[in-house]
Image: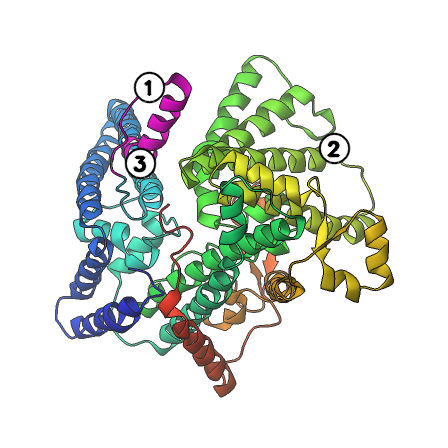
Amino acid sequence: MLFSSFAFLLAFLPTTCAGFLLAGRLKDHRAGLAWLTLCSIVFYGAGNPLGLGVMLASIVVNYRAAAAIARGVTQGSAGRRAASRLFVLGAAFNIALLGYFKYKNFFLETSNELFGSQLALGAWILPLGISFLTFKQIAFLSDARAGKIGLDALDYLCFVFFFPQVIAGPIVHYGEVVPQFQHLRPRFDARSVAAGVSLFSIGLFKKVVLADGAASYVSPVFASADDGHVVQFVAAWIGALAFTFEIYFDFSGYSDMALGLARLFGIRLPPNFESPFKSSSIIDFWSRWHITLTRFLTTYIYMPVMLQVSRWRRRQGKPMLRGGQLSGGAFVGLAMTPSLLTMLVSGIWHGAGLTFVLWGLLHGVYICINQAWRYWRPRWRPEAYEAWMRPLGFVLTFCAVVAAIVLFRAHTVAAAGRILHAMLGLDGVSLPIAVLDRLGALGRLLGRLGVTPDPSAGKYLGVAALFLLALVLIATVGPSSQDLIAELDPAPGRAPPAGIGSSAPVPGISPASAPHRGISAWRMRFTPAWALAVAAMFTLGCCGLNHVGEFVYWQF
């Protein structure tokens, strides 16, 4: 069941909200949480009952493992060692479950191609949000080992299945939401409802109007490349840019809807998306895109790897990462290795295919280059550096992300190669005849430079260019959704309107040095005009529900 569907908007959500408010009339203060948990389980199992069975079995295993781990950490050094071993086994169980359901066929296909084997592929049944739930369960076991949680079956069930964040995150920690569950009081709160409705309406508009609108320019280009056809220069750029903004507004819209739905019930989820195309470096980009995934990868992969390498280098008497004394070996061991490994895991997590692996590694290379520049860049005056490097960094970051996103969308490496080849102009550059004619002298100059006329209509190019330009401006100049409603304190970690936002950890950058994000001057006052704008966005979103597409992250 999608958030952007009539079944959700007209049946599931009203029923859930009404039952939640009615539960508040009962004497049992846990009735509201029980109702919310039941509805979330129904939401999860509505389209995939088998997936629900798999996740319920996983929940039983993880809950019992967490209980044993929690007991172990209170029983001295021997108990703590046993708890650590049990944590490793629990994490391995979750990873194995993810590997079986998400990657089994990928490994079988790869084996068949490499070794000529005839291994039979299984039926593809992927439990909803299994990648997100796997990381959430691992974080839960880690919190149990650290003694940070108190176990309660109802709290845990709602923690896993809470429907606003079960499809595509955010990846929350037990301690971020369970205390809110324990103090949940089903009642109508005007402030929370205003924030929830505003965020959901903005997100619905982004998904249905902007993301799905961009999707219409994507499929023809990538389908042509998948079929082995040569892609034209203009078509390649339109397809790559359109998918860049499709996934941007798709995930941004989902994140807004998730936070908005949670606020309807008085729950505040952590922010997961913060205008990443305003970034001037790839490190800044990853501190803004899928924030909770970056936090998880930093905590459980990047930092442990860097710590282990640091300990090994200290024992060997090798230099560390210390300013002017930085050596190439220290950089490779302490910056490149954890960054590449972290982004490799990110790529594999995103999808079962070689294109996702290459996408992750490419972003790892980007981060390494960014880190190297931070260590070895010329020491210019801060004012001159900001004036020149911030706009240049913005352009380089944007182009790097667009190039990598081709790998993310293409079904094969060969198809991605065809599109990137065309984007570089290596297959020639052509423009519609009507466009070249209207350019006048510039068109004739382009012709002398090798640009050839194309008999295709120029209207398609003009409409696509205007639509993509609008998306660029919204993503790079416009305010974020949370900035717009900053006065309602839309998510934890956000500062009040006069303050500065918090930063998420990112591979290669510590929280203390991460870029700050201030509250935008664009924020809205809650006036009749704002209510009309929210109603208009919700209405436009609903108008497109007959042909709405699935979320890009739906099967992650």
Q: Tell me the kind of residue under disc 2.
A: Trp
Q: How many residues crowd mark 2 within 10 Å: few (<14), some (14–19), many (20+)?
A: few
> Which stretch is magenta?
94-123
Q: CA distance from mark 1 to mark 2?
A: 49 Å
Position of residue 63 in the picture relative to residue 346 (left or right):
left
Q: How many marks?
A: 3
The residue tagged 1 is: 117
The residue tagged 2 is: 376
Name the element at disc 1.
loop
Where does residue 411 sit, x and y in percent of width and height? 46, 40
For residue 449: magenta? Answer: no
Q: CA distance from mark 2 to mark 3?
A: 40 Å
The residue tagged 3 is: 98
Which numbered disc covers residue 416? none
The residue positioned 16% from the left and 75% from the top of the image is 25
Q: Answer whether residue 493 is visible to the viewer in this image.
A: no
Name the element at disc 2.
helix
Indicate which label's residue lies in the foreground, 3 or 1.
1
Q: CA distance from mark 3 to mark 1?
A: 24 Å
Q: Are marks 1 and 2 in contact (CB under 8 Å)?
A: no
Which image quadrant: the C terminus? top left
